Image (tube, rainbow, N blue to C red):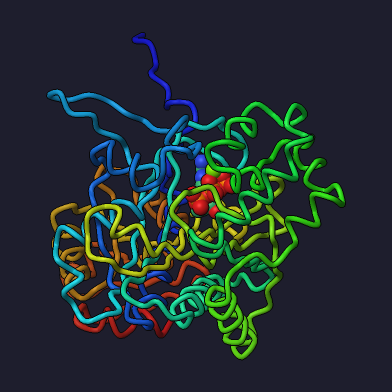
Amino acid sequence: MAKIINVIKGTKDILPQDIEQWHRLEEKALEVFSKYGYKEIRTPIFEATELFARGVGDTTDIVNKEMYTFEKSDRSLTLRPENTAGVVRSFIENGMSRLSPPVKLWYKGPMFRYERPQAGRQRQFHQVGVEMFGVKQPTADAEVILLAVNYLKSLGLNNLEVEINSLGCPKCREDYKKAIKKALKPEFDNLCEDCQTRYEKNPLRLLDCKVESCKAIFAKPEIQKVIQSDFICEECAEHYKELKTYLDKLNIPYTENKLLVRGLDYYNRTVFEIKSNNLGSQNAVCGGGRYDSLVKNLGGDDTPAVGWAMGMERLNSLLEPVEPKKLQAYIVSNSPADAFVLAEEMRNQGISVEFDLTNKKFTKQLEKASKVADYAVILGEDEINNNEVSIKNLATSNQITVKRSELKTTLSKI
Ligand code: ATP
Ligand code: MG
């Protein structure tokens, strides 16, 4: 026997018995996002490596450690680790800044990060996300958070925690960074290796560290005093306050978390996450924020933007599995030629139906019907001669014989 080839570590098949729960996430996304005027965009799964280096930020874990990068014809290409950079590239390249704002886009699809696989963390995983371009006012921040909450509600997830924070603008953030560095200086040697690098390159990211010993340092009162201080400038504070007013008005409960800085470099002002208590340590289902400088950094016109992404595997693990749908009907017949013709007639009427392709006995066919379908449609010799069919409800065993032309209307009645 030939050697079996296995699926790659950190990746998973989505099997036919699980596909309906994926369809549920995708169908709800289309339904809910359309109501708010969002249009789907599909960008390529690989892009120029430079797009992510510049778009996600070269001090991030994603760019430094997690990218799947390969060379082809002397070009460095990367499997997308997230989709904001790709959407922004497309927004710029296709002249979407000339459209009347806001431009509202959503996407779904696979992302790739070389991380340690564990529950809720894969190397190929899926995200659904939205991006809104062209609105600098906090109405946009409020709308995308509302959209996330309503999408989750439409899936039956009501009890998730929304956390928000404001990172300020690059200007006011400088003072905050300095204050954090100053406070942490005496602790420098006790920080983890990653944090020691972040200390110079991107001190805000320290606060995002998941290492327990670092978390303990941040919990110290003298460090907390700096973290909890109001550092943001008047304009940023006003933006943040207005956002909170909208969330209050919309009855969206939230908590403010000053440690929330998000893993990506491009955020400014609003950042947010939506968390569940039922997910163990990988507890974030949604992460997002405002990224007003990204479009310009990637060569476009100065365009404010805000968006979020949700992990679809994590969403699925919070939801009850969907019962796989049965076929509406299964034809039981000893004449494949007649069954073929009847099946096509039924499919043309919108009925899902199969029949036996392998010459099985009548009783075996009936057994199969009761496993896979709601109704058996029996096409015996008599039925064929009289242009009739017998319909059996496989749950109640009710059975009646009707003219073939009445098949569709009878199906739902017995
Ligand atoms: P985390 O802190 O869990 O690593 P993140 O900040 O890296 O999340 P984002 O880049 O904001 O996550 O992605 C948004 C969402 O995508 C996350 O909240 C999570 O639900 C999901 N996600 C991120 N990385 C993975 C992964 N490796 N496997 C499965 N889902 C993921
Ligand atoms: Mg991550």
Q: Position of residue 222 (x, y in %)?
A: 84, 50
Most distant residue in the bottom direction = 249
Closest to the observer: 367 or 117? 117
Residue in the image at 42% along x and 27% along y: 7
- The vertical placement of 232 against 262, above or below, is below
Is 214 positioned to the left or the right of 154 in the image? right
- The vertical placement of 380 against 71, above or below, is below
Ligand 2: image quarter? top right
Closest to the observer: 111 or 52? 52
Q: Quadrant of the C terminus?
A: bottom left
Residue in the image at 61% along x and 91% along y: 249
Is 332 positioned to the left or the right of 368 in the image? left
Is 221 positioned to the left or the right of 85 in the image? right
Closest to the observer: 232 or 330? 232
Whether residue 313 is visible: no
- The vertical placement of 286 against 251, above or below, is above
Residue in the image at 37% along x and 46% along y: 110
Residue 240, image quadrant: bottom right
Is 163 positioned to the left or the right of 394 in the image? right
Q: Position of residue 380 (x, y in %)?
A: 26, 62
Q: Quadrant of the N terminus?
A: top left
Residue in the image at 48% along x and 59% along y: 170
Residue 87, image quadrant: bottom left
- The vertical placement of 116 against 56, above or below, is above
Q: Position of residue 408 (x, y in %)?
A: 27, 80
Whether residue 216 is visible: yes
Closest to the observer: 264 or 344? 264
